[in-house]
Image (cartoon, rainbow, N blue to C red):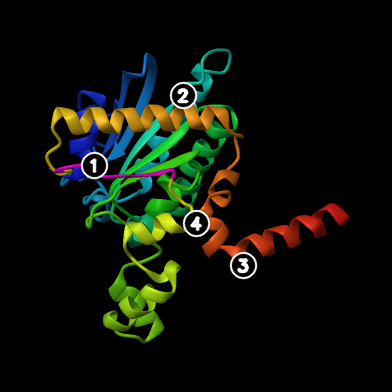
Amino acid sequence: MSRGRTWFEALAGGNSAQPNGPASLLLAEATLGGEKVSYLALAPDPQARFPRARGGEVGVEESWYGARAIQQIIEAGRNGAKRPILTIVDATSQAYGLREELVGIHLAAAALIAAYAEARMAGHPVIALIVGRAVSASFLVLCGQANRVLAFDDPQVLVHAMYKDATARITRRTVEELDALGESIVPMAYDIQSFNKLGGLHRLLHVAAPDAPNSEAVEQVKSALIDAIADARRGPHDLSSRLASQGAQQYRKASLAVRAKMAEQWAAL
């Protein structure tokens, strides 16, 4: 069983798929910290209609049905409580395939991204918990619009634009050379501790036996999620918190300078 499904079941207390939706998209409602929350995750489905999405990738159906589910949560909270949306992330990438391109995976993924953004701006705490891989579009789609992102401090957890072998081919370097560069250039490193330095994470969690969580580990993670929800509610609905951390101030100086210049120019129009 995938780590994403394992933690979805551990946190949500069950395994649920949407009616008429792909079995790879897991959705459930549960109580956390005394309030109702919605959990979402992707998991491998060997019988998926799109073969390239059978490993739990972000695919066409996963994106469209995920967007519909989040829109339903937004509508339900239009005049009431803004339910937190918790995404358990363990997805190797987007679904690369000719079929996906022909039917518009870019539109489907954009719809899910837009749904997360709309929920966040409407006041729903959007929290992403990375328990495995979040590479390429899987990070952009499932984590990019989250108020707060948490991750396990574990070798199997990976956040990056692409895998090392692909990066090596594109940059015409060896994997060993990439590892050496990562020691001095933080954004090129592949370990989750380096990503944390960039200010992208709200918390890095040290969880014992993440592949087989016991009750103590589950309660530890639930407590961290409750904290993240509360912190998201205390802050603004935008993503500015990612640039306010000590790590971002140290390792993203150029990004901060560019943003400041753009804001200055925009204000001058």
- Which residue bears the numbered disc 3? 254
Badge 3: residue crowd in 10 Å (few <14, some 14–19, many ≥20)? few
Q: Position of residue 141 (x, y in %)?
A: 43, 48
For residue 196, say whether it is visible: yes
Of label 1 and label 2, which has the lower sequence position? 1
In whole angstroms, how far apart are the C-alphas of marks 4 and 3?
Answer: 13 Å
Secondary structure at badge 4 equals helix
Q: Position of residue 251 (x, y in %)?
A: 52, 64
Q: Position of residue 157 (x, y in %)?
A: 27, 54
Secondary structure at badge 1 equals helix
- Which residue bears the numbered disc 1? 4
Give the magenta range: 202-209
* Quarter of the image where one finds residue 120: top right
Q: Are marks 4 and 2 in contact (CB under 8 Å)?
A: no
Badge 1: residue crowd in 10 Å (few <14, some 14–19, many ≥20)? many
In whole angstroms, how far apart are the C-alphas of marks 4 and 2?
Answer: 36 Å
* Quarter of the image where one finds residue 96: bottom left
In whole angstroms, how far apart are the C-alphas of marks 4 and 1?
Answer: 28 Å
Pick the front one: 106 or 256: 256
Secondary structure at badge 2 equals helix
- Which residue bears the numbered disc 4? 247
Q: Are marks 4 and 3 in contact (CB under 8 Å)?
A: no
Count of numbered circles on the image: 4
Chief SS of the magenta region: loop
Q: Which label sits on residue 72?
A: 2
Of label 2 and label 3, which has the lower sequence position? 2
